[in-house]
Amino acid sequence: MNTNRMSRQLNYKWVVLFVFVILSNLAWAEKADSAMPMNAQADAMRHDDQKLITTFTGGVVITKGSIIMRGEKIEVRQDAQGNQFATITGDGRKQAFFRQKREGINEFIEGTSDIIDYDGKADNVKLRNNANLKRFAGTTLVDDLKGSLITYENTTERYFVDSGKSNVSPTNPTGRVQAVIGAKPNTATAPVLASSTPEEAAPPLKSSKTLGNKSK
């Protein structure tokens, strides 16, 4: 009996270890975005090696692991420590676009606005003017936020939505924040939604990836 019990305990430990290794590899695969090379397609590129600024223009598409950026113009800057910063601009007809996979789960964040600022050092994204941030579980839309300025913080698991003139439309003449928040089975772990009015609810949102490599 003791031998059988020890054998079962040993097998259980190996199963736990195997599952732990698999989950660790999955998490590492998501975090590896920051180490991925930046791939860009555009009609033209201008690079200033002294200022460490690269400007892409004309139907620009940049990918870095699970990160996708699209715009008519994308300017990528780098500081002395190797942190990268990107400004994505639309062309008036099509807005700037940013997409990123959430870590460890099959969920994605998509954002569109006239201008998108990506800060690789602070690990956040700012969507400016006519901003729209969506969260998808697989292909199912869960959260849908609209405002004048939306800030999405990867590391602190929070986002902020502010109203403004750029959010004014025939269906929203006051320009106030509009939000559709999907239900979550475990509300105890849901982070707080900070917005321009205290009446806004709290959506469950979290993710993290950075653009960390030097681009040429």
Image (cartoon, rainbow, N blue to C red):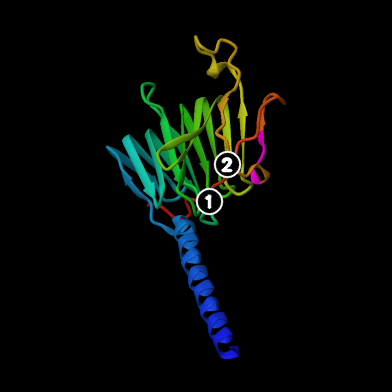
Q: Main secondary structure of the magenta part?
A: loop
Q: CA–CA distance between discs 1 and 2?
A: 29 Å
What is the x, y in percent for residue 181? Answer: 57, 31
Highlighted magenta segment, given as a residue range: 189-193
Disc 1 residue type? Asp
Does the magenta-highlighted stretch encompass residue 116?
no
Is 191 drawn above or below residue 26 in the view shown?
above
Q: Looking at the rendering, in which quadrant would you find the N terminus?
A: bottom right
Q: Which mark is residue 79?
A: 1
Q: Which mark is residue 205?
A: 2
Asked which secondary structure carries label 2, the reply is: loop
Asked which secondary structure carries label 1, the reply is: loop
Residue at point 43%, 41% (across, down): 99
Give the residue at the far right of this rendering.
Answer: 198
* Rendered image quadrant of residue 197: top right
Q: Is 69 situated left or right of 186 in this image?
A: left
Does the magenta-highlighted stretch encompass residue 192?
yes
Of residues 8 and 15, the one nearer the viewer is 8
Residue at point 51%, 56% (across, down): 82
